Image: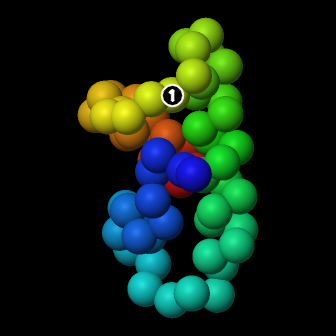
Amino acid sequence: MPFVTLPELKAQLNIDHDLDDALLSHQIDAAEAHVASFIGAPLTEPLPAAIRQAVLLLVA
């Protein structure tokens, strides 16, 4: 389950349609995996604000 939600990402990107939801979900998964690899630890809840923002920026 992603730590950054699809609605959260769509708000960040100002997207108001569902046409790209599958692609955006895939990009969230990839960005979260990259961040976890970069920090050398699995992501856990609650996700710190800086890590959440890093995932959002990577997807954007």
Task: Give the image quarter of residue 21.
Answer: bottom right
Look at the image and tell me whether residue 13 can be seen.
Answer: no
Name the residue: 38% across, 62% down.
Answer: 8
Q: Nearer the viewer, residue 2 or 12?
A: 2
Q: Nearer the viewer, residue 11 or 37?
A: 37
Q: Provide residue 46's location: percent of width, then percent of height.
A: 32, 34
Q: Provide residue 48's location: percent of width, then percent of height.
A: 31, 29
The figure's colour scheme reads rainbow
Residue kind at label 1, given as amino acid type:
Leu
Task: Give the image quarter of residue 33.
Answer: top right
Name the residue: 66% across, 19% down.
Answer: 37
Q: Provide residue 23's location: percent of width, then percent of height.
A: 71, 68
**Looking at the picture, does residue 28 appear above or below residue 53?**
below
Q: Is residue 46 left or right of residue 26?
A: left
Q: How many marks?
A: 1
Name the residue: 61% across, 10% down.
Answer: 40
**Looking at the picture, does residue 46 appear above or below residue 38?**
below
Mark 1: secondary structure: loop
Q: Which residue is disc 1 drawn over?
A: 43
How packed mark 1 is, by other alpha carbons closer than 10 Å (few <14, some 14-19, many 20 or more), is some
Which residue occupies the extreme top position in the image? Answer: 40
**Looking at the picture, does residue 12 appear above or below residue 28?**
below
Q: Is residue 19 left or right of residue 44?
A: right
Look at the image and tell me whether residue 22 can be seen.
Answer: yes
Q: Provide residue 47's location: percent of width, then percent of height.
A: 36, 33
